[in-house]
Image: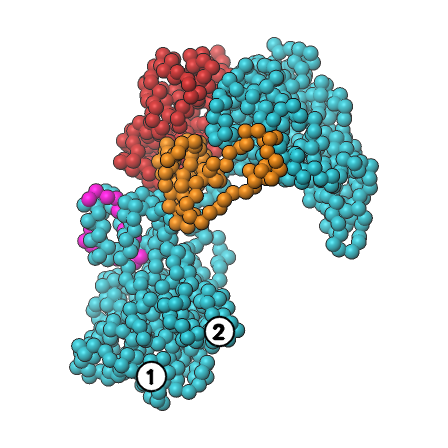
Amino acid sequence: MTVDVRRSPLAELAGELAAVGGPGSVRFAERPFRVQVELRAAADAPVSRLYEALALMLPRGVGYVASTGDRDALCLAPRWWLVTQSPEPAPVLESALAGRLRTAGGAAVSAVDVSAQRTTIDVTGPNARDVLAHGCSVDLHPRAFGPGRCTQTALAKAQVVLQQLDRAPTFRVLVRASFARYLAEWLLDAATEYVG
Amino acid sequence: MLYIPCPWCGPRDETEFRYGGEAGVAYPADPDAVDDAAWSEYLFVRSNPKGWFEERWVHTSGCRRWFTVRRHTVSYEIRDPRPIGEST
Amino acid sequence: MTRLTSGGDRVDRSRPVTVTFDGADYPAYAGDTLASALLANGVRTVARGIYTGRPRGVFGIGAEEPNAFVQVESGTGEPMLPATLVEVYDGLRARSVAGKGRLSDVPDNARYDHKTAHCELVVVGGGMDGLRIAAEAAGRGERVVVCESSRVLAATLQEQDDVLLLNRTTVVGQYDHGYVVAVERRTDHLPDAPETVARQRLWHVRAGRVVDTTKGMEHPYAFPDNDRPGVMLAGAAAEYVTWYGVLPGRVAVVASGNDDALRAALVLADAGVALGAVLDTRPEVPAGLADGLRGLGVDVRTGHAVCGTDADSDGAVVAAHVAPVDEHGRGTAEPQLIRCDLVAVSRAWGPPPWSGQQVRTPGGASTTVGVPSVIRVPDGDGDAAGRTFVDLHRDATLADVERAVRVGMTHPEHVKRYTTIGTGADQGRTANPVMLGVLAELTGRPTAELEPTTSRPPAVPVSFALLAGRDRGRLADPERVTPMHPWHVAHGLPFEDVGQWRRPWYAPRGDEDMDEAVRRECRAVRTGVGTMDASTLGKIELQGRDVGAFLDRIYTNLFSTLKVGRIKYGVMCHADGMVFDDGTTARLSEDRWLMSTTTGNAAAVLDWLEEWLFTEWPELDVRCTSVTDHWATVAIAGPRSRDVVAALAPDLDLGAEAFPFMTFREATVAGLPARVFRISFSGELAYEVNVPAWYGLALWERVLEAGKPYGITVYGTETMHVLRAEKGFPIVGQDTDGTVTPQDLGMSWAVSKRKSFVGKRSYGREENLRDDRKQLVGLVADGDRVVPEGAQLVVAPGGVPPVPMAGHVTSGYWSTALEQPFALALLERGSERHGERLYAVDDGEAVAVTVTAPVCYDPEGARRDG
């Protein structure tokens, strides 16, 4: 049996993140090692061919998410998607999903495994929107954003992919590994007022 | 802090964008075919009008796509955001 | 005491507090400002003039206050705030200042934050009008933000979803596209501010529209000795009565030029202030108001003004000089003395004192025309009859304006700069209208023709700590770290900042200093094996049918012919032909390529590639994906590096022919899935092992373990720099500065003559054909002194300035390979000057150097295969 030697960029802070707050305010949870594949399609790419490999139709609207089970496909820009799902069980150079998508997509679709490029932090609770508003200028009001929506933007001084999961509300923040420690410390600081 | 209408992401703070300068300054199809004066014009000279100005932006912190807007250089009013290459 | 026994709708008489001012304790009520508290206790002198040192009292009631600046010493402390905006709390301690405060030398440990809000409507002012407008908008389903400067919001609107009611919140800036910035003072009024709550919050509101419901701005007129404690705006005097139940004086002379000031006189009289006289510069005033006052037995005089004051030994007003005046404000008879302790002055009312828009201060546009801005005594100009202050905050006088005009300053902007009128923290709210009036009179132009000066945000002073928000300390700027960072920290490696990255600088052993550590690290790589964390290099994966053709256009050299499995070094230039970045690119498969960029340029290179792809060449099928953070990279360099990699990857054939220079292999390294690149930045045999980032720390530890038998030595960026410089490899951004071509770097070999690429056309420009361009050279120095980066090169030491500069040092180190100092430099005609003796000027001292080729170590490249 292989010892799992993966180490999340938030390994040192995950405990602190998980300990903060409560259901009445805001809570954080790192979801490390999730599989992430960036898909980019040429203008003439028949992306519908990916349906079988994905088990979902890629959303066409920028800022929208399609989901099936634990797999999400986020449309980040025209012909650009980020597909995320549960972690691989063992060390691999490239996730199986990335290989499958590359095979299915052919020459006109790029499928790049970026699983270690970003880590995932879920921010949830009645004050989740408040915490994000301390460093994010996007309008996250329910009439402008909601479950099934996503965007790329800046949170504090880090670029992030932001996805709303539910109306709790829960926001999923995907941040580059090298910025993760900075952003986690920023989130903990921004939450101070709400978690007492 | 301008509020710039990205054609794909909607209005966002200026800090999410990078400025792309005057629109419609095309890279010469064959740079070797233009003389020094025309090449210098391409490299260095822009129109800088007072009033309406066609300019390019790229939504670097968002969808990373390029687009063109008309911006009034006095009032900063912005109109007609559209993908690069599309006319109004 | 001058507190009324009742009244004052802003104070809470059930909550008495004690404040300390200049060491003395005073009773006050919650809801008081420090200004109202001091007036309630008969404290007349609260500050001193910045230059004159003359005593000053409270002049206004809000942001217009020019006089009553105080240093707050309790709580977080603030060096300079108008007492009119300081809300009291039990234990508030403040001190008077003479025009400017003193920064605290105690760190400000309070919390500050920023928050964003989006709405359809911002209402400035939380009075009845403001809340009515807000309620109407909320009823239409609009999101509304109400900003009220004071603690009191009218109680007509309930907190509800989508309505944000902010008291103690001042709009300080209104910018383009509905961007409104407001300061919320959240704990400044609390004696024991909770540590977890941000003391102040800067709101960034994006609003569909803004409605300003704040009241207009009262303008004074100026007169000799108008700066004494006891001189106050008439409207402010009345509001101290109605808002705080405080009498600003016992006996008042009201110096009016408008109807509102007459109404203020009625309020004062009603509250029990004795009115020594009510003067109005106008020849006629509305009969109703005059009669009302006369009915109270008040001496009402039209066509009269205050033209001076007398002071007691403390400098505060004890009498007003009263005289009839003509329409220019010139006294027409000898002044009469009227005893009083309050001169309540009001020339006119203008528009609201602006809530942060960048506007031309509408100083001349008051409700009343024909009322003079300055009153002069019958004879004598300038300050003969006492100094007439135009700007109380700046201590600038009528004589200053007259002097400005005499030397030719006629535009208000010029007068502002010459006299400093309007440049204080109050932005000259009470001074600008007077200055414009005086200037109009002196230059014989109507006030309306004078272009007023510009007021700019912030409308009230904002502390830098608030602007910084949480961007302080560790959060001041993101510190990007690699997966191996915890090891570097645990082993005490000093860090170097490269862009936002924290990179290990060197790895000292024992009590080594940097020079000792770097020399040891260099020797280890040249003679044994060293390892460094190279994860920060930018990495971009390019896919598509046209990547080869695209790279041919972007790089100066040819890439499309590169075979799968091979790696090539490339240089990219901007269209002007100047070097922009360099790095290696590997061809992973027929249509997948992996580009590396310099650490600091990763984002800029991606932007550059996508700019061409999206805007100029959309017909090219190329898609770029940043993978910088996905991969962790361990560089293993030195003649023994093959042994270390062999121990880690027993299945990988590492023979020089099986795995040649500038190729890569996929392999299991240390039990981890990896890509191994045979590239070298040191000139030695070297490998770079890449694994998905979350295996980076495990890989690093296993490399160190496997390298132990070979004495593997951790090295940092400094050693990397020395080793590459010995090989003459330039670092973009250190040895180049945006004015350097590949040819200048001696890299003509990397510039294709056969194909077109971005920048090529510029090499035919006259500037790039000059034969005196600076070119990259090496320098070896006599003696032991390392010539530092930035040193200028001269042909002869000494000489009379200006000494011609022949070039400058871009990198300077001690070379363990040469056992002497050496440097890289950009030198005019450098490539022709190898062997020439020059001098590098370091801190005034000339160091003799010899020009060499940039490559000073292993020029034939014999060491890269080990």
Provide residue C400's location: percent of width, then percent of height.
48, 74
Residue at 24% x, 55% y is C130
Q: Which residue is mark 1?
A: C325
Q: Which residue is mark 2?
A: C405
Front position in the image: C46 or C447: C447
Q: Please tell me whether the stretch drawn in magenta is mainly helix, strand or loop.
A: loop
Query: Is residue C153 located in the magenta-colored stretch of the structure?
Result: yes
The colour applied to the residues of chain C in this rendering is cyan
Provide residue B4's location: percent of width, then percent of height.
39, 40
Q: Is residue C509 left or right of residue C446?
A: right
Disc 2 on helix, strand or loop?
A: helix
Label 1 packing within 10 angstroms: few (<14), some (14-19), many (20+): many
Write down the chain letter for disc 1: C
| Numbered range of the magenta stretch | C140-157
Q: Which amino acid is tagged 2?
A: Val
Image quarter in which the N terminus of chain C is found: bottom left
Which chain wears orange? Answer: B
Disc 1 on helix, strand or loop?
A: loop
Residue at 50% x, 57% y is C105
